[in-house]
Amino acid sequence: MKLSRNLFSALGRIAPNRTFFSVIMGGVAGCCYALLIPLVLASFSDDPLSQNQSEAETLRFLGFEVVHYRMALVFLIACLLIIFTKALSQVLLIRVSIELASDTRTKIFKRIISAPIDQLEKMGSAKLIATLTSDVPRIVIGAGLLPELLISSVSLLGVLSFLLYLNPPVFSLVLGAIAAGAVSYQIPMFFALKYYTRSRQATDDLHEAIRGLILGAKELKLSEKKQEDFLSKIAGTAEQKILKHDKRANTFIRTTAIYGEMINFFIIGIIVFVFVNYRTISKSELAGITMALLYITGPIATLLNLMPQYLNARISLNKLNHILNELCNERSATGKHAAGFFDSVKLSDIYYQYPTEKFQAGARIGPINLILTRGQITYIVGGNGSGKSTLAKLLTLHYKPTKGTIAFNDTAVNLENISSYRNAIYSIYSDYHIFDKLLNLPELKKDSTFNAHVESLKLNSLIDMMGDNFSSQNLSDGQRRRMALLCALMEDKDFFMFDEWAADQDPAFKRIFYEQLLPALRKRKKLVVVITHDDRYFSFADQIVTMEDGELKSIYHQTQTSILDNHPAAR
């Protein structure tokens, strides 16, 4: 999935009929603009378009005398048409542009949801946030400029056509001068585009700096040296890059725009002071030519002034397409194959290789051979960097193994059934997130089970429920973890994964978690996996898997009898 390569085709994909009608209205407005100067010149007594001066009539209207009232009426109609068609063209295309923004964001949301987790981790959140907050608005602004660009272009062509009718040699001179100016205009615009592109690339670094500033505020608060280094080496570096590139780009843009606006006056000077010495031009023709050239200064200035925003929109569109191309779709068959009941999950000769762009070359885990059974609790233990979390993400189907097979019962996980098996899994990782709206859990406030869990987790005074929304902004880390556990218990899936859930809990809630909640899940025949360092509670596990340097070092099994003997609370 990717967006169109240019703004016009992107708009046409969203609403082809309205986009086409907007273009037509813009063209009509441009033609009416181009008609105004010939109408004014035609009212002059010696204008070539005035066919018979005796036909000029005066009409009294609302107490005012109107000369050449027919032409005045046409002039008025043209002005009213400009107001109507230009407004209609711009309003239509602005609305389509807003729809394009919404559709684009939705596509990005869906692509992020369907992208492999390891790709999202490799790309980083800052780049995606920059795309959503910077690129999409720029695309909307650029798309909204198309009617104005079209109207100015048609007006320019119309006035040039009038010059061709008025004096072909002058038209040739003007056309040649505009062509030469357009070619020379592209040279500085090339450099401006290059600097705008570099500025956009630096925007990703700036968003990453902002993310680091927010997440690392506590660390920065405790060291003035860190604050200075952050401002100078991280945020400052990104800001300086953007500042430098934007300044250079706008210097080229503004200088070129002024040069473009003055091209007409250079042409007028050449015609008035030089060209008349080689070609016979009447004063009325010269006045008409001068008026026409002065008139097209407006459309040319519009085209030149709007060009930077249009270029930024093109850069953002290319950046957005690049992001979408980087995020490949897993192409899993959502909902087509329902996951059947499973007693076990088996990993056979599993290897996983990390992307070398983010992790050191050769970083991997494997081989892993492991069987997890429903009605049992499995602890995964090991030091930092041993591969515990990677193994967990393989088990929860967030990562796809580089080699080997994951099977639920005897059914190997593949693209056809992976979504269905994921629907049977609930995980709480150390970097978990709690949504402000309860997803997939309607009418929980009225549910007795929900209220019982809220009471046992001591969350009844902390949750402010409003329909299916709740606020968790002022909760501590431990309380937020209990909130995540509450959502997990209410979804009541078949496979639970807890990554260091008890790390931020006080001793009382640790006991509740290990001695009550986990045994209750075992009793209900759930498959439970816990990443933990709490060796005090190791005896509650049915099996303990030890990871070391990316390899499965050992598997220790306990009998149900030994568990009950060691901890009667597990009964």
Image (spheres, rainbow, N blue to C red):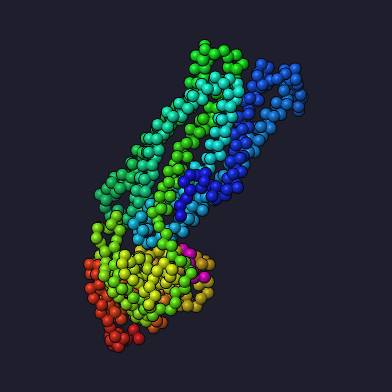
Observer-nearest residue: 210 or 85? 85
Of the 4 image quadrants, the one containing the C terminus is bottom left
Q: Is residue 440 magenta?
A: yes
Observer-nearest residue: 6 or 61? 6
Q: Is residue 423 above or below residue 289?
A: below
Q: Is residue 251 magenta?
A: no
Q: Is residue 374 above or below residue 217?
A: below
- Direction from residue 337 to residue 195 in the image, left or right: left
x and y percentages locating residue 318 in the rendered image: 43, 46
Observer-nearest residue: 171 or 89? 171
Instruction: Identify the residue at image location x=54%, y=19%.
Output: 169
Q: Is residue 14 above or below residue 199?
A: below
x and y percentages locating residue 214 in the rendered image: 36, 54
- Direction from residue 76 to residue 264 in the image, left or right: left
- Spot the residue most to the top: 277
x and y percentages locating residue 560 in the rendered image: 31, 86
Look at the image and tell me whether residue 458 can be seen: no
Magenta span of residues: 436-442
Instruction: Identify the residue at image location x=49%, y=52%.
Output: 104
| Number of numbered markers | 0
Observer-nearest residue: 439 or 446? 439
* Quadrant of the rendered image containing residue 457: bottom left
- Direction from residue 398 to residue 11 in the image, left or right: right
Instruction: Identify the residue at image location x=31%, y=69%.
Output: 404
- Direction from residue 35 to residue 324 in the image, left or right: left
* Quadrant of the rendered image containing residue 558: bottom left
Q: Is residue 529 above or below residue 53?
A: below
Look at the image and tell me whether residue 29 can be seen: yes
Instruction: Identify the residue at image location x=52%, y=33%.
Output: 302
Main SS of the magenta segment? loop
x and y percentages locating residue 258 in the rendered image: 45, 28
